[in-house]
Image (cartoon, rainbow, N blue to C red):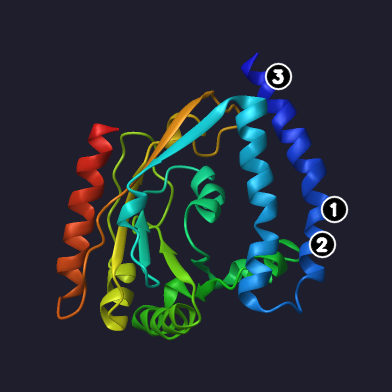
Amino acid sequence: MLFIRSLLFFLIKTVLTIPFSLLILLAAPIPALPRYRFITIWGRVVIWLARWVVGIRFRVEGRENLPQEPAVVLAKHQSAWETIAFQQIFPPLSFVLKKNLLHIPFFGWGLALFSPIAIDRGAGREALKQLEAQGRERLASGFWVLVFPEGTRMGVGEKGNYQVGGAWLAAKCGAPVVPVAHNAGRCWPKNAFIKRPGEITVVIGPSIPTQGRRPAQVLADVEAWIETTMRRL
């Protein structure tokens, strides 16, 4: 039954994605924020399908912790679910991603319309400069910035090496950091075709101030909060 429901979810999502991807490309002339709200309709449909076809629900704790001003979100990364669902949980988000992804025909063109922060991760300190320049611009234009500090998806119960980039951006811009923990990997495992019914819990932590603080100190606070909360989940 799990296979059949997962297959049905995959087929419906694929059929919907093809025409919607063409609509997204037609949205290119629309200003960034209205365009973002339009193209994230696809994500809302996918999360709706996940609920009614596969049985994946979610709930959010800590919405009251979201600050009024644009912030940098540092989140656990377990699956593709959060990259889709966060679009409807948080204000408009600018994702940090590898620059070469934007060069992939159609897929990369669609990513570019999300107003992401595209950096060359192999450029060392130059990548941090790219992150700061683009991140400052996104924050000033009303976007929040989403960074997965472990850099890649981690399996349930796994912990990666937390990287300083997101905390560094927040400290440079004086933006608050919002730590986020979740257990999406239990229902939507990384690189897995089979999706499992259940309830995903997303926990939004208290915002962490960055002004006058070193990025390493901010990152240590984020890591401690996320990993402590993950043990509860």
User: What secondary structure is marked by label 3?
Assistant: helix
User: What secondary structure is marked by label 1?
Assistant: helix
Q: Identify the mark at residue 4; answer none if there is no mark.
A: 3
User: Residue at image x 44%, y 33%?
Assistant: 200
**In what quadrant of the picture does the N terminus appear?**
top right
Dot 3 crowding, Cα within 10 Å, few <14, some 14–19, many 20+ = few
Q: Identify the mark at residue 23; answer none if there is no mark.
A: 2
Q: Where in the figure is residue 133, as x and y percent of width and height? A: 43, 86
User: Residue at image x 71%, y 61%?
Assistant: 107
Query: Gap in Å between the C-alphas at discs 3 and 2?
Result: 29 Å
Specify the farthest residue to the top: 1
**In what quadrant of the picture does the C terminus appear?**
top left
User: Residue at image x 19%, y 42%?
Assistant: 228
User: What secondary structure is marked by label 2?
Assistant: helix
Query: Gap in Å between the C-alphas at discs 2 and 1?
Result: 7 Å
Residue linked to disc 1 = 19
For residue 113, say whether it is visible. no
Q: Where in the figure is residue 48, as x and y percent of width and height? A: 64, 38
**Picture layout, residue 2 above or below residue 214:** above
In the image, what residue type sits under mark 1?
Pro
Q: In this orientation, which residue lies closer to the viewer: 46 or 163?
A: 46
Q: Where in the figure is residue 43, as x and y percent of width and height? A: 64, 50
Query: Gap in Å between the C-alphas at discs 1 and 3?
Result: 24 Å
Discs 2, 1 touching: Cβ within 8 Å: yes
User: Residue at image x 56%, y 33%?
Assistant: 192
198 to the left or right of 180: right
In the image, what residue type sits under mark 3?
Ile
**Picture layout, residue 188 above or below residue 152:** above
> Along the polypeptide, which appears first: circle 3 or circle 2?
3
